[in-house]
C-alpha cells in the first residue's frame, strides 16, 4: 500500500496521525487484472448482446448485424482519448462495454448495442473486483475512478459494493444513481461510511441496457480505479505525577504513570537511584543529596513514542544541621530551630515541643528538630543519671488543698511567665500548665490519682523541682 498526501495531526483524547493510504488500485495495464468480467450478480447476463472487455482499442468504424433476418449497418464512433494523468495515456488499457455485433465486425472500442425490444433485448452486464480488500482500521474510505458513458436515461452505468465478499451487492446511488450523458473522460469520487472498517470489501460496475430509441455511444468505460482511506494511527501520550516533589535528603519518591496508548516505558531519574527504570509505575526512587532534579518519561507503542521532560521537577532540600543539647541544671536546651520534639528513651515526651525541656526522670534524651522545609535532624543522645533537687527559698510554698488543687505560694520570687510540669513517679508527664501571675497559682489536679508526683517549676532563667503526694 502507498500513502498519499494526508498528514493531519488531531489533538483529541489522544494523538491521532491521519494518514491517507491507497489500499487498492487498478489501471488495467498489467497482463492480469483484478476484475472478474461478465458475472451474473445483480440480475446480469454472462452472454448477451454486449459484454465487458479490457483492451486499449479507441478506434471505431463501420459495422453490421442482422435484425429480423435483414442486414443492418451502423457506425461506431471513436472513443475519446484519455487525460494526461492516466497511466499509459492517451490510449491505455481500460475496462469497457463492447457489442457482439461490433466485435464481430472487427471493431473493439467502447460501444454497445442498445436494446430496442426487436433486434436486441434488455440486459444487464456486470464486472466486479475478484478479491476482497480490508479497510479495517480505516475511515473516510474513498472509491475513485475515471469513467465515460454517453448512453441514455435507459442505458447507463451503475456502481455497486459488497461487504460480504461478493455474496450480496448494494447499489451506491450517491452522488450518481445513473452514469450517462458523459461523452468524455471524467473522475468520480465516492465516500460512504459503509466502506469503513470492512474486512471483505469489493466494488463492481453494472451497465443497464434497457429499451430505448435515443441512446448513443460510447458505452460504459472505467479506468484508474483507486480505493484509499485514512488510517488512524494512535500515538502514545506520556504523562505522570510524583508522590512528592519537595522532600529532604535521603528520601524516596514514587511515580504514577498517567500515560495513554502506550505499551512500554523508559524513565530517566538523574540524581536518583536507580537512575533509570522500565517499570510502569516506579516506586522507591532514592535521592540521597540535596538539589533539583529533572525527570523524563518516554512512552512507546507500535506507532511511535512520546517524550515528556519535567525539568527541575524534584527538589531535595538540605537537612538542617544536627542540633546540640546542653544541660543547664535540670533543663535541657537545644540550639534554635523551627520546631522541636524531645525524646526520652526513644519515646516522644508528651508536650516536649519547646527549645527548653525540663528533666522528668533519668534516662537517654535527644531532640528532633524540624526546619521550614519540613526536614529534620536529630541530636546526639544525652544520658542523664540523676536529677538535681533544687530547693525553693524559705518563702516559696507548694501544697495541695481539699479542693483538689495544687497551690503555689510566693511565686513572685520567680520571673514570670513560667511553666509547671507534673510527672508521675515513673517520669511520665501527666499535666502541664503556664502561669502568668506573681501571687498565688492554683492548678486543678482532680484528675490525678493517689501517688507521688514530681513538680518542675521553670522558665528561661531558673528551675525548681519539688515533690507532692496525693492521698
Image: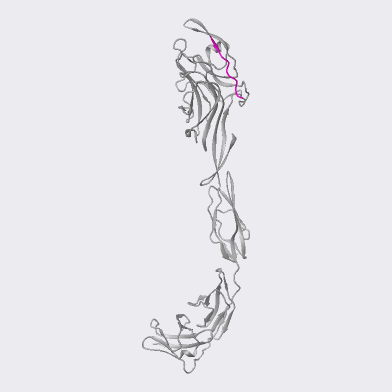
Q: Is residue 185 visible?
A: yes
In percent of width and height, residue 312 lies at: 61, 59
Residue 56 quadrant: top right
Residue range of the region highlighted in magenta in the rendering? 74-83
Residue 424 belongs to magenta span: no
Q: Is residue 272 visible?
A: no
Q: Is residue 192 left or right of residue 327?
A: left
Quadrant of the image containing the N terminus: top right
Closer to the camera, 356 or 73? 73
| Looking at the image, residue 325 lies above or below residue 291 | below
Residue 166: % across, % down: 48, 27
Residue at 53% across / 13% down in the picture? 100
In the picture, the quarter occupied by the C terminus is bottom left
Q: In the rendering, at what x and y percent does residue 109 appear?
A: 57, 16
Residue that protrudes farthest toward the left in the picture: 402
* 77 magenta-colored: yes
Q: Nearer the viewer, residue 452 or 154?
A: 154
Magenta stretch secondary structure, dominant? loop
Amino acid at each position: 500500500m502507498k500513502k498519499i498526501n494526508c498528514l493531519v495531526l488531531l489533538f483529541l483524547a489522544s494523538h491521532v496521525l491521519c494518514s491517507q493510504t491507497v489500499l487498492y488500485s487498478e489501471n488495467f495495464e498489467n497482463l492480469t487484472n483484478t476484475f472478474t468480467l461478465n458475472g451474473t450478480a445483480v440480475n446480469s447476463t454472462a452472454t448477451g448482446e454486449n459484454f465487458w472487455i479490457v483492451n486499449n482499442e479507441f478506434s471505431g468504424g463501420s459495422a453490421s448485424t442482422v435484425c429480423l433476418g435483414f442486414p443492418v449497418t451502423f457506425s461506431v464512433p471513436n472513443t475519446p482519448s484519455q487525460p494526461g494523468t492516466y497511466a499509459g495515456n492517451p490510449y491505455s488499457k481500460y475496462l469497457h462495454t463492447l457489442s457482439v455485433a461490433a466485435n464481430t465486425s472487427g471493431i473493439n472500442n467502447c460501444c454497445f448495442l442498445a436494446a430496442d425490444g426487436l433486434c436486441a433485448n434488455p440486459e444487464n452486464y456486470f464486472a466486479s473486483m475478484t478479491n476482497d480488500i480490508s479497510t479495517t482500521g480505516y475511515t473516510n474510505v474513498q472509491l475513485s475512478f475515471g469513467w465515460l458513458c454517453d448512453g441514455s436515461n435507459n442505458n447507463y452505468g451503475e456502481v455497486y459494493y459488497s461487504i460480504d465478499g461478493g455474496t450480496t451487492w448494494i447499489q451506491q446511488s450517491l452522488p450518481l444513481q445513473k452514469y450517462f450523458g458523459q461523452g468524455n473522460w471524467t473522475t468520480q469520487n465516492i465516500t460512504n461510511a459503509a466502506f469503513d472498517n470492512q474486512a471483505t470489501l469489493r466494488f463492481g460496475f453494472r451497465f443497464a441496457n434497457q429499451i430505448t430509441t435515443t441512446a448513443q455511444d460510447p458505452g460504459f468505460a472505467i479506468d484508474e480505479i483507486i480505493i484509499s482511506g485514512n488510517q488512524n494511527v494512535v500515538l502514545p501520550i506520556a504523562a505522570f505525577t510524583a508522590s512528592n516533589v519537595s522532600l529532604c535528603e535521603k528520601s524516596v519518591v514514587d511515580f504514577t504513570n498517567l500515560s495513554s496508548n502506550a505499551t512500554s516505558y523508559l524513565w530517566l531519574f538523574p540524581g536518583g537511584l536507580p537512575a533509570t527504570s522500565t517499570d510502569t509505575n516506579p516506586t522507591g526512587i532514592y535521592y540521597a543529596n540535596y538539589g533539583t532534579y529533572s525527570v523524563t518519561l518516554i512512552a512507546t507503542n507500535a506507532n511511535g513514542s512520546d517524550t515528556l521532560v519535567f525539568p527541575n521537577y524534584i527538589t531535595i532540600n538540605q537537612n538542617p544541621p544536627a542540633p546540640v543539647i546542653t544541660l543547664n541544671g535540670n533543663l535541657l536546651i537545644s540550639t534554635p530551630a523551627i520546631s522541636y520534639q524531645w525524646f526520652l528513651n526513644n519515646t516522644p515526651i508528651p508536650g516536649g515541643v519547646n527549645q527548653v525541656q525540663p528533666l522528668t526522670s533519668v534516662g537517654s534524651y535527644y531532640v528532633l528538630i524540624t526546619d521550614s522545609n519540613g526536614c529534620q535532624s536529630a541530636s546526639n543522645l544525652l544520658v542523664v543519671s540523676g536529677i538535681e533537687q533544687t530547693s525553693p527559698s524559705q518563702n516559696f510554698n507548694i501544697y495541695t488543698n481539699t479542693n483538689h488543687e495544687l497551690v503555689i505560694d510566693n511565686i513572685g520570687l520567680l520571673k514570670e511567665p513560667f511553666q509547671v510540669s507534673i510527672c508521675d513517679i515513673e517520669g511520665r508527664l501527666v499535666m502541664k500548665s503556664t502561669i502568668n501571675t506573681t501571687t498565688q497559682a492554683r492548678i486543678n489536679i482532680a484528675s490525678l490519682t493517689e501517688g507521688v508526683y514530681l513538680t518542675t517549676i521553670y522558665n528561661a532563667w531558673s528551675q525548681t523541682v519539688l515533690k507532692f503526694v496525693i492521698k
